[in-house]
Image: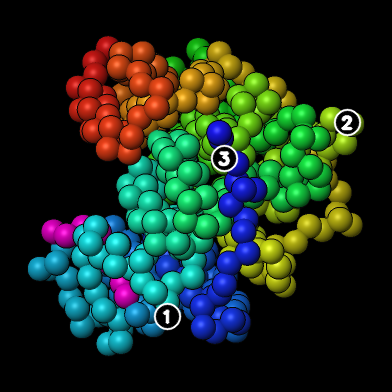
Amino acid sequence: MQINILDTYHPRPHSLNPVMKQIAVLGSTGSIGTSTLDVADAHQDRLKIFGLAARSSWEQLAEQTHRCQPAIAVLTDESLSGSVDHSRFHPDTKLVFGAEGIEQLVTAADVDMVVSGIVGAAGLQGTWKAIEAGKDIALANKETMVVAGPLIMQLAKANNCRLIPVDSEHSALFQAMLCGRREEIKTLILTASGGPFRGKTAKELESVTREAALNHPTWEMGPKITIDSATMMNKALEVIEARWLFDFPAEKIDVVIHPQSVIHSFVEYVDGSVMAQLSPPDMKLPIQYALSYPERWEGVSPRMNWKSGFQFDFETPDREAFPALDLGFEVAERGGTCGTVLNAANEVAVERFLAGELEFCHISRLCRDILESHDYHPSPSLEELLTLDEWTRKETYSWKL
């Protein structure tokens, strides 16, 4: 039996203080993490940052400890343990390192909710440990669902955890799905900005530079996510994420280009009604909704100006120019080990492109080659997925034209 995200919304008690929700932020120095701290600053009567975690940006993390005064700060890069200036951190903050530090943070008794904002497959194990400990998850790490979606949903159900999406598209779908019954939904429709190369042909994309690919027209994001937007691999991964979060088959999920990035996604019901969530592009809104659910608080994000003139445009994605989209739908349909392979291959391919080792158009081609060469398994364990992740990365690093 499949599990969808609405199955995870059981009432559960808050901590001893029913007003204050204590938050652990994984990936606190990234775009999701810093936006989360902005939301927490705006709602200090409701939210308390219990702990922060970053990979290696220890100076920024140290500054954040003075801003939030968390009980715990984690650097996952253990090689820094001997070189970090501990005096730069807030005196009331305990600094710990590595995977054990992440586990200590996400399983702490005082933590009510974990914001999973670490980019890539690296965010999986921290999220897994948090769910095992019964913590609610504000899920910004789509790769967790791409790699191990069915296992994550089963674990959340077993541990009475709520998974609330932070990705603007999945937050929009979740909000729109609350307007009707599940059996009344016809299609989940993800919107995409089209990235910096909207309208470009496959031929034109053969000469794309690193600088052009990093120049996103709408969102300010880290380099990996920005390249994923340029290839539309981000939308492929979001299709897979939606497939497991909401337990909808791939044929009931669709993607449209919406360059204004104001309609973040929408749900079409069987009677023809379409429910959408609209707002200016700012990640603080879906982050706040995940932290406040089922309530809505006064917002800190920009608002729509309905008195100004604007228009909404929609286009069909060019699957020839952006073949990553086909990969997303294929992986969403097959499931099993495919998500792990696609995600790991893409992470390495993007890294190699940014390093100047691959052409832009080779990213999707490399991912397909690795996906087609792996030993497919329909129902892998977590251990098997982690082993396959390592295999995929080695194969992708050695891939040549």
Instruction: From the top left corner, tell me how far across and down residue 392 is, in percent.
Output: 27, 27
57 lies above or below 89: above
The crowding category of the residue bearing disc 1, from other C-alpha atoms within 10 Å (few below 14, some 14 to 19, many at least 20), is: few
Check the image and tell me how it is coloured: rainbow
Q: Is residue 75 magenta?
A: yes
Instruction: From the top left corner, tell me how far across and down residue 254 is, in percent.
Output: 67, 27
Instruction: From the top left corner, tell me how far across and down residue 206 is, in percent.
Output: 44, 17
The crowding category of the residue bearing disc 3, from other C-alpha atoms within 10 Å (few below 14, some 14 to 19, many at least 20), is: many
SS at mark 3? loop
Q: Is residue 281 left or right of residue 321?
A: right
Extreme-left residue of the structure: 82
Q: Is residue 127 magenta?
A: no
> In this figure, which residue is indicated by the disc labeled 3?
3
Q: Say if mark 2 contacts mark 1, CB within 8 Å.
A: no
Question: Which residue shows up at 82% across the image and 58% down it?
Answer: 305
> In this figure, which residue is indicated by the disc labeled 1?
67
Which is nearer the N-term, disc 2 or disc 1? 1
SS at mark 1? helix
Instruction: Compare residues 138 and 117 and report the one nearer the observer.
Output: 138
The amino acid on which the numbered mark 1 sits, given as a three-letter code, is Arg
Cα distance, mark 2 to mark 1? 48 Å
Instruction: From the top left corner, tell me how far across and down residue 216 is, in percent.
Output: 53, 41
> In this figure, which residue is indicated by the disc labeled 2?
272
Cα distance, mark 1 to mark 3? 39 Å
Question: Which residue shows up at 76% across the image and 49% down it?
Answer: 178
Question: Can residue 324 be seen by looking at this rendering?
Answer: no
Instruction: Compare residues 400 and 108 and report the one nearer the observer.
Output: 108
Question: Which residue shows up at 81% across the image and 48% down it?
Answer: 179
Residue bounds of the magenta highlight: 72-79
Mark 2 vs mark 3, foreground winner is: 3
The amino acid on which the numbered mark 3 sits, given as a three-letter code, is Ile
